[in-house]
């Protein structure tokens, strides 16, 4: 299934990124600086943020702003990375249902839109947690990522998925490049499922809310004020909702003295032949 | 049924909450401080959330019983409403809840005893009879197998014969009611729109036939039942191309035939109709949420802070509909919602 809506993957380290870049066939986007950004044909984009919540927040903001210049559609956002856990086994995946930033005690609750995943608390810490005091995934980026992602998407379209790399039986010291790659690769099916789910949701969102192209064309000759832009948008939406978009083409071929005149005629046409 | 269950710390260890959680061991159970952290936050989309709504178990503070909006009910007595739940498991496109709340998640306030005490206080302070509406901010029966609403609130009103409880619903979840002894001061009011309107706008709602069947069982068991033909939406878009406004009346005629074939009109407590109407601010929110919905692309007008659809010969059409209805019921049973 192909989607035109995208998903942005935010990962802390190049080692975590590598298996994802390979699987989703992503290529480095040369124009993007200062962060390494990778893109693919399926609308998937990946940024390597660096370690820590501040780095994740900054990279997410950077990607969101960079993307806003490239495209108007809303994308899904997914933070992926390794984490420690008190109870879960190495290699298991956990979808965050609550993100707690230890430094500030702030909490975030990503909407639970996807079934079939193990879910749990994710605690974002500022230094590696070696004692795992709570039944939660310990990592360093989720809260920063999520707070920034909320600037570009809503709670349904931003998710955090962590793969367990260490626990009380397997210390953090055992983690090396190969191990990280194996952890990420072992969860690639679940990651792909999440990415597809987010793409589908973003698609639903964009289908509902993306502005019709004809709106720009109609407005281009009559220079509407800000208020008139909103009114014109709503009129165009009403034509679309009533399945009467074709009639807008007639208005493209006419000339109007002002935005007010254009809107009055659009409104009159709706009233005259709408039957409602 | 739910994508997750959020639990306020304050109610987490109560018997009612533990009993609910035991029914859903495989659904993520997430602790929170206050329900508003999830329900009232910014940056959430009601429309997307409706695809996978969560249940939030919480404690209600503040005024638990409120005066009913003017013109809401069937009685001139003092009228109140209480909301043990916010939001509805159904997804009716015309519903004002979509414009009222930011979240599509369901909040269930589990401190029923506090609601009971507040109801007791209001009844004691009321000189004469009073009416209490449940189902204003939710559908009270739709989640009854989980909430046990009826098992708590019906006995509450059995202790207060001078007060009436109206439970407004579109649900067929009547098992708990059928297991109980009917009380004379509890009315189960079922809402209907014609088949064509239900198919187009009432998503996830039980079929009309099933609703009639459930209401019929309640009536036979001795419960007082009422009929709410709301919201009335005149118009042709729900029918085949070329239909006339009179087709709305034909659709209502069929609905009345179907309903009164199974429901004995002589013992129906009350019957009401009401045009689609909605506070302006809610309507604006809904238009933003569903810019692509034909229903909200209609011509509208505003009367006393409420948005209504503009209808040709509105009074005439309403009267024609009422005339149809009076072919089945007495005028004394009827009221038109303001």
Image (cartoon, rainbow, N blue to C red):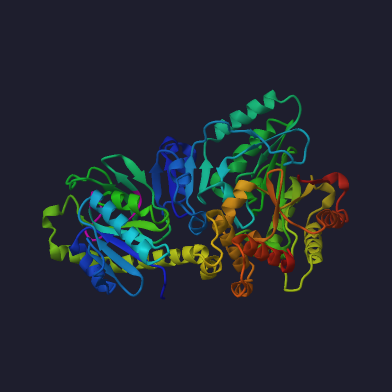
Q: Residue A94 in the image: x percent, y percent? A: 31, 56
Q: Residue B206 in the image: x percent, y percent? A: 64, 59
B323 lies above or below A200 = above
Decide if residue B187 is on the left or right side of residue B111.
right
Q: Residue A115 in the image: x percent, y percent? A: 41, 60
- Find residue A70 and report its image quarter: bottom left
Evaluate whether residue A29 shows in this view. Answer: yes
Q: Indicate the quadrant containing the C terminus of chain B: top left, top right, bottom left or bottom right.
A: top right
Decide if residue B89 is on the left or right side of residue B232.
left
Residue shown at 43% from the left, 42% from the top: B37
Decide if residue B8 is on the left or right side of residue B106.
left
B218 lies above or below A65 = above
Decide if residue B53 is on the left or right side of residue B33.
right
The residue lying toward the viewer, choosing from B76 and B11, is: B76
Q: Residue B67 in the image: x percent, y percent? A: 67, 34
The residue lying toward the viewer, choosing from A221 and B99, is: A221
Number of numbered discs overlaid on the protein picture = 0
Magenta stretch: residue A97 in it?
yes
- Residue range (magenta): A84-98
Residue shown at 63% from the left, 34% from the top: B66
Residue shown at 88% from the left, 48% from the top: B330
Evaluate whether residue B140 shows in this view. Answer: no
A241 lies above or below B315 = below
Magenta stretch: residue B15 in it?
no
């Amino acid at each position: 299934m192909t989607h035109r809506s995208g998903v942005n993957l935010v990962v802390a380290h190049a080692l975590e990124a590598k298996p994802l870049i390979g699987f989703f066939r992503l290529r480095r986007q040369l124009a993007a600086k200062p962060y390494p950004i990778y893109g693919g044909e399926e609308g998937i984009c990946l940024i390597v943020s660096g370690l820590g919540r501040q780095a994740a927040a900054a990279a997410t903001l950077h990607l969101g702003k960079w993307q806003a210049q490239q495209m108007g559609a809303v994308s899904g956002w997914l933070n992926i990375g390794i984490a420690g856990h008190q109870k879960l086994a190495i290699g298991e995946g956990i979808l965050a249902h609550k993100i707690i930033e230890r430094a500030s005690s702030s909490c975030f609750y990503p909407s639970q839109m996807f079934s079939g995943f193990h879910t749990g608390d994710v605690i974002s810490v500022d230094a590696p947690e070696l004692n795992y005091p709570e039944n939660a995934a310990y990592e360093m980026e989720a809260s920063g990522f999520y707070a920034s992602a909320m600037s570009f998407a809503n709670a349904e379209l931003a998710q955090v998925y962590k793969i367990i790399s260490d626990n009380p039986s397997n210390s953090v010291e055992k983690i090396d490049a190969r191990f990280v790659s194996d952890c990420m690769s072992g969860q690639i099916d679940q990651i792909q499922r999440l990415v597809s789910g987010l793409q589908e949701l973003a698609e639903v969102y964009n289908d509902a809310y993306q502005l019709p192209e004809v709106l720009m064309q109609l407005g281009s000759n009559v220079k509407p004020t800000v208020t008139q832009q909103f009114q014109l948008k709503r009129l165009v939406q009403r034509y679309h909702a009533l399945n009467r978009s074709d009639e807008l083409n007639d208005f493209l071929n006419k000339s109007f003295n002002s935005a007010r005149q254009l809107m009055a005629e659009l409104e009159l046409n709706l009233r005259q032949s709408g039957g409602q | 049924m739910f994508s997750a269950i959020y639990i306020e710390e304050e109610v987490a260890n109560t018997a009612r909450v533990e009993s609910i959680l035991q029914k859903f061991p495989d659904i993520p159970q997430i602790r929170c401080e206050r329900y508003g952290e999830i329900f009232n936050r910014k940056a959430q989309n009601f429309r997307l959330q409706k695809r996978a709504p969560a249940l939030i178990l919480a404690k209600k503070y503040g005024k638990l019983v409120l005066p009913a909006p003017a013109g809401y009910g069937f009685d001139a007595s003092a009228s109140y409403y209480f909301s043990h739940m916010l939001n509805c498991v159904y997804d009716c496109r015309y519903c004002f809840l979509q414009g009222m709340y930011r979240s599509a998640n369901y909040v269930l306030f589990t401190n029923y005893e506090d609601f009971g005490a507040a109801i007791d206080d209001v009844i004691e302070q009321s000189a004469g009879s009073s009416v209490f509406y449940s189902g204003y901010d939710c559908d009270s029966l739709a989640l009854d197998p989980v909430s046990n609403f009826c098992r708590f609130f019906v006995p509450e009103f059995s202790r207060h014969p001078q007060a009436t409880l109206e439970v407004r619903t579109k649900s067929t979840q009547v098992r708990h009611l059928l297991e109980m002894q009917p009380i004379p001061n509890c009315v189960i009011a079922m809402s209907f729109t014609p088949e064509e309107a239900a198919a187009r706008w009432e998503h996830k709602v039980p079929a009309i036939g099933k609703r009639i069947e459930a209401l019929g069982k309640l009536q036979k068991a001795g419960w007082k039942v009422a009929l709410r033909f709301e919201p009335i939406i005149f118009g042709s878009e729900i029918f085949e191309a070329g239909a006339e406004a009179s087709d709305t009346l034909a659709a209502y005629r069929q609905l009345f035939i179907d309903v009164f074939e199974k429901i004995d009109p002589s013992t129906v407590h009350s019957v009401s109709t009401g045009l689609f109407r909605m506070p302006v601010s809610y309507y604006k929110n809904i238009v933003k949420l569903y810019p692509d919905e034909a229903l909200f692309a209609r011509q509208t007008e505003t009367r006393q802070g409420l948005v209504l659809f503009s209808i040709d010969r509105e009074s005439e059409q309403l009267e024609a509909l009422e005339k149809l209805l009076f072919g089945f019921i007495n005028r004394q049973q009827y009221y038109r919602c303001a």
